[in-house]
Every structure is written in structure tokens, then in C-alpha cells.
Image: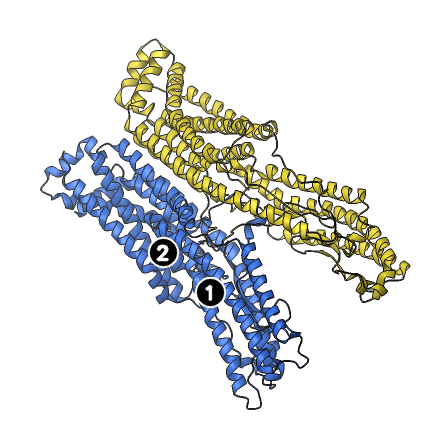
């Protein structure tokens, strides 16, 4: 078996395609590192500044529990992932913050209580540059490496069949599946040599730079990503061998492979996503906005109808309940709209799982901590923190026996100052366990594809007539 | 003789598996994507119609001139199905009033704009062609000469009394005839699907013809690249590898690689800052003149009785990032208290003075802003485009965008029309003496009648303009074709068999 693998390997190492693939992958990986090093420090700096500002604003409010209860925690920023060079995902389109503040109209001459909202950002609105795909690992692996894998395998069996050398090999007392495994290994190693070299160069460049520090967890994640790359290349090698054995003619096998590649890699992810996103369309943003405004107006009018004309102002408890319900309603509304949008995003992504490239894109995003799933995690973090913050305000208020315990009303709350350290601060964390959970389905699907293709290649080769 | 050769090649090509496979996949991709794109277009059109209706309603609800909501909408371009360009990306509605210049940079977006699906780029028909036609061209060409050389049939042909140039010509003509079949057939299917739900004008059909012509030149270019490789390499295997890597580089890698090259970075901020200062000066000057007028009339001060009487809302600002400049002069009141009635003549004089001033000020500011934004963003986009043209994909994309009218120039046409419309509206207001009328600030003696307001209409540029914009790129494609063909002939004549 090793004999065959070695023979394949030597054949490949001397070929034009090996040289071209090496140059191409190396160029891409180096570009990737350069681009990342140019942009990442700026991004991290901007994040740290913004987060520090947010904390400072929050601490400046600590003189008064009431201003903490109405002003809210302010902007909550998403921390950029140090592994963004692996998968940029849709980072460029996603908002980088959520916000907990009390902007909006005053109610009965009081500031309203803070609520969470998720700002819409349309960064592309002024972008007149041509479309670019970002040169991240996901692109290099998903598109280029799979293409290279096909070019290495399309003639692995059909080529030998045409030249007649396959007959010679099989005349030796070697079982066929050993031949197949040998070919598989040969192709696998010869694809992995240029890729490993370029990845090492890429990481070398990134790790020697002072601007970026990768910790142990990041390296672990990179290891997992490399494992995914191996699975993915195996998939395409198996596909190449399968078609090569089934078609018998190199020219035809290449055409078939290219057409499969073009449909599954280039077209399917995008076309299927647009079909999938059609199945669950959120209402237009203006409509959502109008509805929200109407809701606020209705609440205000209801309040005015009840208490507006009475000479004696309503009791503190009534006021407190009113401001709290208003904020809750509003926040629930924001969340409902966000859910609609997320649902559409999920639908669009679910259907693309037919394409292994889309699966790998998702896996890369999950483990690199970027993109859609990461944003969902961020939103979860934000919502957890919001609960924590509210509890903190209530608990601090409870601890003061002089207070009336009506949150959201100046007279009803504790008047004691709060120590700035005691206020919970927002921490945007990533959780590897959770990443594994979201990735499990995709990983299993990828393995399933691989098993199907490998057994297909095996069957096709074993039953091949020579 | 040429005829015989062509017939032979044609039959050779047509009867192959690759022809059938390519035909099938092109049809499939074009049809599926056309269906998706048509639905998408219809959705955008519906959103546009909704928005127009809403904006009409908003205008009708405006009681005074100063609080009028006048917005215009940009209709989706039906040819964006062929090449979407900037049509879906840039803003599609914008406000029109005297203290604001409607430009491409300030337009906003209606409809569902979900950040969670923005990642999936919409695949238009030109993109399908970009990928498939180039692949087709190379697949048909890589063994055209190298294959015959390997099989030894080339010698047999050359033994006949035929010029080498003629052989190449025969191969080129027959292959192109074959390759045109999937192109034309899939386009016909696409048009069939399109015209069922989207009405296209004659001009649109001419534009589509332009796109087809460009696609033809693009296809031929890739066939010639393949032929060049085939002529220059001794073996089919090598030719194939080279062709595939050339394809991967030109289509996949290069268009994304140029992002590295252009990064003006630091001096953007400096440039924006200078422009910001200049505009701020213009606004300051406006503010000074306004204050002078207020003092002369003895009504200065934002908290004065005058501003209370008028429910004054005044703002003149420039955004430090986008340089958006706007001057708002509004009265948010439903009636004037009887004891404030004495201010009405002053208010009329005030608005009559300040509104033309504001109009002039924002126009002046826009000239500075336009220059700055052109230098920063437009120049960069142009630079990208020029670099992209080193790959045929870039030329093809540009030319088809120009035909479809979804390029920057096509989008600018709309915003220029918006600026002309703003002029028309201002002239209309002058003609109605609106600036010095009571309805400008209060509607207690009757609301504004909007029925005579000029309507906004926008016609996409005519076919001739589209052609003019597309021609340079088409010529470039043509020249590339000719140069390649000559190179191939030269190499083939010199080569030994």
C-alpha cells in the first residue's frame, strides 16, 4: 500500500499542478496574513476604546441608583475574534453592538426606564466599490483547496486506465481496495504538503507580529479547524476518485467534476440561501418602526386617559408600574423583530447544508468565533447581562430599608450612592463547548458526506472492469 | 475546404459528452437563478410601490410647507436581474427640501434589510455566465491543438493544402458556434421566464442585446486563452492543468486579491477633516447672516418670544464622518396665539430672507463635499475597477453593468434627477411665494394644497447612453480577442508538428 502511495506521491510532486498549487496557496495565505495584520489591530483598538468608554459612562452614573435604573448599561460591544483571518463570515454586515439606554420620549415628565435595543447598521449603503469576497481561510479552503483536490484526483484512475498502467498494477497480487487507499493517501499527502506549508507561513507571520496575541484556546481552535480542513479535502479526493473510476475517461471525468464543483461550491450556497430566506420574510423595518411608535403612543394615551385629568398625581406605585411596563413592552417588541430577522437568517443557512462548502463555511465561523452563530451568542450574552443588571438594581434597592422599592421612580428608590466596582460589567465571552454544540450537526453531516463518497469510490473502483 | 474543416470540428464538438453536460448545467443554473431573481425583483418592486404610497400619504398629511415630508423613491431596475451592480446596495429613497442636497451618499433604504442574510450575495445571470462561459471556453479549447498533436491527426490535416491560419479559423468558428448554443438557449429561457411577470420595453431588449454581445466577446476571449495554452504546450495534460489554474486565478483569486493593493487608509480622515472645516465655515457664515437679520429685526435669541411664537426648530449641521450638510428651518405649531399674531409679518420676512440663504448655503457646501467624496470614495472605486480590468471578468462585469444601467453612472443619473427635482420644487415654491406665505409656518388659515406640486419622474438613460458607457470596455474585450488570436496564429505557424 505504501508503495502505491509513494509512487503516487512522487508522480504528483514532480507535476506542474503541484508547483502551481503551491504557489497559489502560498500567495493566498500570505495575502490573508497581511490583510489581517493590517486590519485587526485597528479593530481591537476600536473595540477596547469603545468598551472602556462604555464602562466609564456607566461608572459615572454610580452616584445614584435611580440614574442606573433609568439610564441603563449603555452600549454593549461585541469583542472581535482574534481568529477572524480564518473566517470573516458576515462580520462586515453584522452590528457590532447592542444598546441598553432610555432614549425616546419622556413619560409624564419622567425619563423612561432603559430597554434593550439592537441597532440596525447598513454599512454597505455608501459602498460603491466592486464586490469582494474576503480572502479568509474559509474561502481558501472552501473554494481553492477543493478545486486543487479535484485537479489532483480527476485522472487518478481514469488516467491510468487510459495509459494502461492500471492493468499492470492490478496484475500484482494486491487487493483492489489497497490500491484505492494507496491512491487516496498519495493524493491526500500531496495536497496537504502545499497547504500545510502555506498555513505554517500564514501562522508564522501572524504569530510573530506584536499586534496579535493568540492564546492557548485560539491555538486549540486552529487545531480543530485544521481537522475540518482534512475532512473536507478527503471529501473532495473521494469525489474525484469516485468520478474518475466511474467515468473511465479523464477528459469527461474532469468536465463532470468541474460541473459538480461549480454547482456545489459556487452556486448552491448563495442560490439556496436566497430561496431559503424567502420562506420567512420579516416585516419591513419602516413598518416595524411605525408599529413600535404606535405602541408607545397607545400606552401613553392609556395612561393619560386614566390619570391625566386627575388633580392629584397618581401614587408612586402606579407610576412605577407604568414606566416598567412601557420599557418591557418596548423591549419585547424589539426582541420580536430581532427574532424574525434571526429566523430568516437561520432558514437561509439551514437549506445550504446540502453543499459541503457551506457546511465548512459554517464550521469555520463557529470555531473561529465569527459570523452568524457568534452573533447569536453575543445576543445571548447581552440578554443575560441585561437580566443580571436589572437584578443588581433591584437587589441594591432591596438592601436599603429606607427605600420604597419602586424601581424606575426617583422618589421610590434608594438614595444611597452605589460603589462603581459593584455594578456588573458586560463581558462578551465565547464558549468552546457551545461552539461544539452548534457545530455538531454540521460536523456529522460532513462525516456523512465523506462516508457516502468514500464507499461510492470503493464500490466504483472494485466493480471497475478493465 | 474551410467548410469541410468547420463541419468536421462542429460534429466533433457537438457529439461530445462535455457539450451535453455544459448545456444542461448552464440551462439549469440560469433558469433556477432567473426564477429566484425574478421573485426578488418583484418583492423589491412591491416594497417600492408601498414606499411611494406611504410617502404620498406623508406629504398629504403635511399641513405646512416647513414641515412637509417630501420623499422620492428609486424604482428597482428590471435589468438588475442580469447584472445587479449597485442597484440593490445603495439607498433607494431620499428626502427633497431646500436645505439639503439629495445625493447618492445620503439615500436611505426601505424594505427588509436583514443583516443576517446580507452575506449571501445574490447571483445574477451575468455572474453565472462569468463562471460558466469561461469554464466552457477553456474546456473546449485546451485539447483543440494539443490533442490533435498527441493523436497525430494534426499531421494528417497539415499534409493537406490548407493554411495553418485556416485551421485555427475553422476551429475557432466551429467551437464558437457550439458554445453559443448554451448561451443563447439559456438566455431565451431566462427571457421567457422574465417577460411572463416583468414587462420589458424595446430599449430594455436592446440593452439585453448589448449584454449578449458582450457575453459573446467574453466567451470568445476565454476560448482564445484556452487555444493559446493548447498551441503553446506539447501535451494535453499540461494544457489542461495550465488552463484550470489560469481559470482559478482569473475568476476566483485575482478579483479578490486586489483588495490588498488599494488602501488609502490614513489620509482619508485628514481629507474629510479639511472638507468638514470648510463646510463648517460656510455654515458659520450662514449662521452669522441669520443672526444679523434677527438682530436687525430685534427678535434675536433662541428663547425669545418670537421663537416661542413660531415653535421654532432650527438646525444647521454637518456630519463629521459623512459630511452630510443640512439646514432645517421649521415651525412646529398648529396655531398662533392671538397675542403673538403681531409676529406674523416678521416671521414672513424672516423666512423669506433665510430660506433662499439656506438654499444657497447647502449648494455651496455640496460643491465642497462632492469634491471631497469624489476624491476619497469614487477615486478608490475607479481604481478598483481599473485593477479589476486586468482580468477579463472585470471588463465583462463593467460592460454589462453599463448596459444594464446598474453601474455608478446609472445610479448617479437618478440622484442628478433628484437634484434637478429639488430645483424644480424650489422654483415652484418661489412661484407660489411660499417662502413669505403664512402657510410656510402655520396651517391655521388653511393647509397647503399639494395637488399642484410637480411630480417626480425618472427615466433611465436611453440606450445610446448605455452603449456609450459600455463601448470602451467592449473595445477592450475586442482588442484582447484580436491580440490573442494573432498571438495564437504566430505561435502555431512557428511551431513544429
Q: Position of residue B222 (x, y in %)?
A: 42, 29
List the residue tagged with mark 2: A363
Disc nearer the start of the sequence (1/2): 2
Q: Chain of mark 1?
A: A
Specify the label residue B370 is tagged with.
none
Left or right of A164: which side holds A208? right
Could you tell me how many numbered marks the image carries?
A: 2
List the residue tagged with mark 1: A379
Q: Quadrant of the N terminus of chain B?
A: top left
Q: Which structural element holds mark 2?
A: helix
Q: Quadrant of residue B227?
A: top left
Nearer to the camera, B374 or B316 = B316
Left or right of A101: which side holds A356? left
Q: Which structural element holds mark 1?
A: helix
Q: Colour of chain B?
A: yellow
| Residue located farthest toward the left when viewing the structure as drawn | A173
Q: Is residue B11 above or below residue B281?
A: above
Say which chain is blue.
A
Amino acid at each position: 500500500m505504501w508503495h502505491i502511495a509513494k509512487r503516487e506521491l512522487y508522480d504528483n510532486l514532480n507535476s506542474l499542478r503541484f508547483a502551481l498549487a503551491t504557489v497559489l496557496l502560498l500567495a493566498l495565505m500570505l495575502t490573508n496574513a497581511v490583510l489581517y495584520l493590517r486590519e485587526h489591530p485597528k479593530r481591537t483598538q476600536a473595540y477596547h476604546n469603545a468598551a472602556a468608554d462604555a464602562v466609564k459612562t456607566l461608572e459615572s452614573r454610580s452616584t445614584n441608583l435611580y440614574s442606573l435604573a433609568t439610564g441603563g448599561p449603555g452600549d454593549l460591544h461585541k469583542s472581535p475574534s482574534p481568529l477572524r483571518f480564518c473566517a470573516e463570515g458576515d462580520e462586515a454586515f453584522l452590528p457590532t453592538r447592542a444598546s441598553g439606554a432610555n432614549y425616546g420620549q419622556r413619560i409624564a415628565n419622567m425619563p423612561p426606564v432603559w430597554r434593550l435595543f439592537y441597532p440596525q447598521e447598513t454599512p454597505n449603503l455608501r459602498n460603491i466599490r466592486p464586490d469582494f469576497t474576503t480572502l479568509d481561510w474559509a474561502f481558501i479552503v472552501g473554494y481553492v483547496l477543493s478545486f486543487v483536490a479535484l485537479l489532483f484526483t480527476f485522472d487518478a484512475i481514469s488516467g491510468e486506465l487510459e495509459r494502461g498502467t492500471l492493468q499492470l498494477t492490478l496484475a500484482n497480487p494486491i487487493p483492489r481496495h489497497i490500491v484505492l487507499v494507496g491512491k487516496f493517501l498519495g493524493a491526500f499527502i500531496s495536497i496537504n504538503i502545499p497547504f500545510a506549508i502555506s498555513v505554517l507561513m500564514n501562522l508564522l507571520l501572524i504569530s510573530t507580529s506584536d499586534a496579535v496575541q493568540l492564546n492557548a484556546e485560539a491555538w486549540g481552535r486552529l487545531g480543530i479547524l485544521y481537522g475540518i480542513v482534512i475532512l473536507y479535502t478527503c471529501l473532495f479526493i473521494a469525489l474525484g476518485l469516485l468520478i474518475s473510476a466511474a467515468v473511465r475517461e479523464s477528459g469527461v471525468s474532469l468536465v463532470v467534476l468541474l460541473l459538480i464543483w461549480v454547482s456545489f461550491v459556487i452556486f448552491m450556497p448563495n442560490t439556496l440561501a436566497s430561496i431559503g430566506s424567502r420562506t420567512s420574510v420579516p416585516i419591513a423595518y419602516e413598518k416595524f418602526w411605525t408599529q413600535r411608535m404606535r405602541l408607545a403612543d397607545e400606552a401613553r394615551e392609556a395612561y393619560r386617559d386614566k390619570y391625566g385629568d386627575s388633580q392629584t398625581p397618581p401614587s408612586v406605585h402606579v407610576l412605577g408600574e407604568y414606566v416598567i411596563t412601557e420599557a418591557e413592552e418596548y423591549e419585547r417588541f424589539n426582541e420580536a423583530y430581532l427574532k424574525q430577522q434571526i429566523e430568516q437568517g437561520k432558514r437561509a443557512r439551514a437549506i445550504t447544508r446540502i453543499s459541503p462548502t457551506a457546511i465548512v463555511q459554517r464550521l469555520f465561523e463557529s470555531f473561529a468565533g465569527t459570523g452568524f452563530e457568534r452573533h447569536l451568542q453575543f445576543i445571548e450574552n447581552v440578554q443575560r447581562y441585561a437580566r443580571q443588571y436589572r437584578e443588581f438594581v433591584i437587589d441594591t434597592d432591596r438592601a436599603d430599608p429606607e427605600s420604597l422599592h419602586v424601581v424606575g421612580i426617583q422618589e421610590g428608590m434608594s438614595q444611597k450612592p452605589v460603589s462603581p466596582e459593584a455594578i456588573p460589567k458586560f463581558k462578551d465571552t465565547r464558549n468552546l463547548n457551545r461552539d461544539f454544540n452548534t457545530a455538531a450537526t454540521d460536523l456529522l453531516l460532513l462525516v456523512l458526506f465523506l462516508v457516502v463518497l468514500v464507499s461510492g469510490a470503493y464500490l466504483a473502483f472494485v466493480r471497475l472492469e478493465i | 475546404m474551410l467548410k469541410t474543416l468547420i463541419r468536421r470540428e462542429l460534429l466533433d464538438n457537438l457529439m461530445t459528452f462535455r457539450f451535453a453536460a455544459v448545456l444542461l448545467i448552464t440551462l439549469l443554473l440560469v433558469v433556477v437563478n432567473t426564477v429566484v431573481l425574478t421573485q426578488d425583483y418583484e418583492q423589491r418592486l412591491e416594497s417600492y410601490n408601498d414606499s411611494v404610497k406611504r410617502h404620498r400619504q406623508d406629504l398629504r398629511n403635511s399641513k405646512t410647507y416647513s414641515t412637509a415630508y417630501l420623499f422620492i423613491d428609486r424604482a428597482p431596475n428590471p435589468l438588475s436581474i442580469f447584472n445587479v451592480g449597485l442597484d440593490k446596495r445603495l439607498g433607494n429613497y431620499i428626502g427633497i427640501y431646500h436645505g439639503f442636497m439629495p445625493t447618492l451618499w445620503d439615500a436611505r433604504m426601505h424594505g427588509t434589510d436583514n443583516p443576517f442574510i446580507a452575506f449571501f450575495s445574490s447571483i445574477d445571470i451575468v455572474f453565472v455566465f462569468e463562471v460558466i462561459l469561461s469554464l466552457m471556453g477553456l474546456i473546449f479549447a485546451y485539447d483543440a491543438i494539443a490533442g490533435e498533436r498527441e493523436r497525430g491527426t494534426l499531421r494528417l490535416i497539415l499534409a493537406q493544402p490548407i493554411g495553418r491560419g485556416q485551421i485555427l479559423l475553422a476551429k475557432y468558428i466551429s467551437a464558437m458556434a457550439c458554445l453559443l448554443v448554451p448561451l443563447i438557449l439559456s438566455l431565451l429561457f431566462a427571457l421567457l421566464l422574465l417577460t411572463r411577470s416583468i414587462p420589458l420595453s424595446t430599449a430594455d431588449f436592446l440593452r439585453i442585446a448589448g449584454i449578449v454581445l458582450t457575453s459573446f466577446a467574453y466567451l470568445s476571449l476565454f476560448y482564445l486563452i484556452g487555444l493559446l495554452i493548447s498551441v503553446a504546450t506539447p501535451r494535453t495534460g499540461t494544457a489542461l492543468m495550465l488552463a484550470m489554474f489560469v481559470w482559478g486565478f482569473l475568476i476566483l483569486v485575482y478579483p479578490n486579491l486586489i483588495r490588498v493593493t488599494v488602501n488609502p487608509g490614513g489620509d482619508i480622515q485628514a481629507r474629510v477633516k479639511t472638507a468638514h472645516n470648510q463646510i463648517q465655515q460656510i455654515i458659520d457664515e450662514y449662521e452669522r447672516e441669520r443672526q444679523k437679520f434677527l438682530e436687525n429685526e430685534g427678535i434675536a435669541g433662541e428663547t425669545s418670544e418670537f421663537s416661542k411664537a413660531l415653535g421654532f426648530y432650527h438646525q444647521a449641521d454637518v456630519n463629521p464622518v459623512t459630511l452630510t450638510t443640512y439646514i432645517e428651518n421649521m415651525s412646529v405649531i398648529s396655531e398662533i396665539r392671538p397675542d403673538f399674531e403681531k409676529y406674523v409679518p416678521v416671521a414672513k420676512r424672516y423666512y423669506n430672507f433665510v430660506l433662499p440663504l439656506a438654499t444657497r448655503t447647502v449648494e455651496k457646501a455640496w460643491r465642497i463635499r462632492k469634491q471631497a467624496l469624489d476624491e476619497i470614495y469614487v477615486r478608490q472605486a475607479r481604481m478598483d475597477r481599473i485593477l479589476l480590468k486586468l482580468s477579463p471578468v472585470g471588463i465583462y462585469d463593467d460592460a454589462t453593468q453599463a448596459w444594464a444601467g446598474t453601474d455608478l453612472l446609472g445610479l448617479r443619473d437618478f440622484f442628478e434627477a433628484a437634484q434637478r427635482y429639488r430645483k424644480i420644487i424650489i422654483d415652484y415654491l418661489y412661484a407660489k411665494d411660499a417662502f413669505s406665505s403664512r402657510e410656510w409656518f402655520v396651517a391655521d388659515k388653511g393647509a397647503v394644497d399639494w395637488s399642484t406640486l410637480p411630480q417626480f419622474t425618472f427615466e433611465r438613460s436611453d440606450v445610446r447612453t448605455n452603449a456609450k458607457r459600455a463601448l470602451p470596455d467592449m473595445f477592450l474585450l475586442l482588442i484582447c480577442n484580436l491580440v490573442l488570436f494573432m498571438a495564437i496564429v504566430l505561435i502555431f505557424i512557428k511551431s513544429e508538428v
